[in-house]
């Protein structure tokens, strides 16, 4: 009798676990569709003509009434264009060099910030991880306080300092504050502090210098976290809008993200194509380093 009851309980447990798995799968699938839908719509709509975009999204862009384009009374989300057209990409890539100029402006601003912020953060985080003392803790606490402040709080001081140094309306006005951002320092310090001290002690017993310890022990052990930090920094500054708008009055220096923030009714078709081109670097970096990114996030919870 007990054996029969035990089997029934096991069957019920198996059934409940399968139901839970099914519900979790449905929830995850629904969430994935919701999150991916804007990206898929952006890519597919970039191959639509301006006329078709106006017809499908007439309510949203109703101001584009030029008397020549049919405006729908309802929003019609379409994943497949009626006629596939590459005219938007031809305009962006060939006919109008202004978009490519803004794309390379974004590269010129973002890449130095990522590289030099990582260089500064590696040195600072290694020092915070290795040194001891009250002063070090106070400085690290100040780093956390500054990191918690929204960028809008420090935007006015950055503007005033750039003006005094004569850097206003130059790329350095955006690059220099980005290089010394405390975000990477905080994350890499937490990663380096999780490295067991016995590794350092063994290296010191072998006569290794601090530089050797840094390059042969600390750097390899935080490589995954390092890539995660680089990716987060890139995405953050790749999408920046406030800094160029405030610190760069010359529109020829603005990145492509500023154009995307100023979409008007006459450029909706181009905006879809520009958005696809603009998301490619971040998407490729994520796909190329997905394993390292996941490992870096997981190591922050497992490395002791």
Image (spheres, helix red, strand yellow):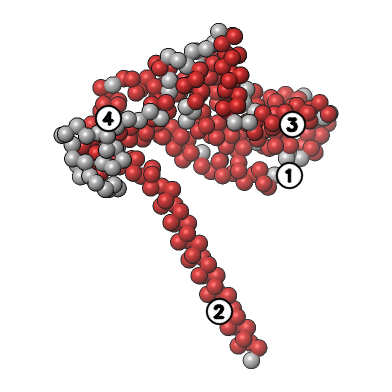
Q: Nearer the viewer, residue 20 or 168?
A: 168
Which is more N-terminal, label 4 or label 2?
Answer: 2
Disc 4: which residue: 266
Sort mark 2 into few (<14), some (14-19) or many (20+) by Cα contacts within 10 Å.
few
- On-image quarter of the N terminus: bottom right
Side of 73 where 38 appears, left or right: right
Which is more N-terminal, label 2 or label 3?
Answer: 2
Secondary structure of the residue carrying numbered label 3: helix
* Residue 186, x across and y down, in percent: 67, 33
* Residue located at (51% from left, 65% from top): 21
- On-image quarter of the C terminus: top right
Q: CA distance from mark 3 to mark 2?
A: 54 Å
Disc 2: which residue: 11
Sort mark 3 into few (<14), some (14-19) or many (20+) by Cα contacts within 10 Å.
few
Q: CA distance from mark 4 to mark 3?
A: 49 Å
Disc 3: which residue: 141
Which is more N-terminal, label 3 or label 4?
Answer: 3
Disc 1: which residue: 304
Q: Quadrant of residue 176?
A: top right
Q: Nearer the viewer, residue 162 or 6?
A: 162
Side of 246 where 276 appears, left or right: left
* Residue located at (66% from left, 43% from top): 300
* Residue 264, x across and y down, in percent: 32, 30
Q: CA distance from mark 2 to mark 4?
A: 62 Å
Question: Vertically, is 72 above or below 157?
Answer: below
* Residue located at (23% from left, 31% from top): 87
The reply to whether the C-beta atoms of the residues labelled 4 and 3 are less than 8 Å apart is no
Secondary structure of the residue carrying numbered label 4: loop
* Residue 146, x across and y down, in percent: 66, 28
Side of 56 where 301 appears, left or right: right
């Amino acid at each position: 009798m007990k054996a029969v009851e035990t089997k029934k309980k096991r069957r019920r447990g198996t059934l409940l676990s399968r139901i839970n798995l099914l519900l979790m799968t449905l929830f995850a699938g629904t969430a994935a569709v919701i999150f991916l839908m804007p990206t898929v719509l952006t890519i597919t709509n970039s191959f639509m003509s301006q006329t078709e975009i106006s017809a499908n999204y007439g309510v949203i862009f109703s101001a584009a009434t030029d008397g020549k384009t049919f405006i729908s009374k309802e929003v019609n989300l379409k994943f497949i264009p009626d006629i596939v057209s590459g005219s938007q990409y031809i305009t962006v890539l060939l006919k109008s060099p202004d978009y490519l100029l803004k794309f390379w402006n974004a590269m010129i601003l973002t890449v130095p910030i990522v590289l030099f912020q990582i260089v500064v953060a590696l040195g600072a985080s290694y020092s915070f991880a290795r040194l001891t003392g009250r002063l070090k803790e106070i400085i690290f606490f100040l780093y956390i306080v500054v990191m918690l402040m929204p960028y809008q709080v420090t935007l006015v001081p950055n503007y005033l300092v750039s003006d005094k140094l004569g850097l206003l309306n130059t790329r350095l006005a955006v690059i220099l504050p980005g290089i010394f951002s405390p975000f990477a320092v905080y994350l890499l310090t937490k990663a380096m502090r999780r490295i067991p001290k016995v590794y350092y002690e063994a290296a010191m017993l072998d006569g290794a210098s601090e530089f050797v310890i840094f390059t042969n022990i600390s750097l390899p052990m935080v490589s995954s976290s390092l890539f995660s930090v680089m990716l987060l920094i890139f995405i953050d500054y790749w999408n920046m809008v406030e800094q160029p708008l405030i610190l760069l009055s010359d529109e020829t220096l603005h990145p492509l993200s500023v154009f995307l923030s100023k979409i008007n009714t006459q450029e909706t078709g181009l905006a879809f194509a520009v958005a696809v081109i603009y998301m490619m670097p971040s998407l490729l970096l994520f796909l190329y380093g997905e394993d390292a990114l996941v490992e870096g996030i997981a190591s922050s919870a497992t490395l002791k």
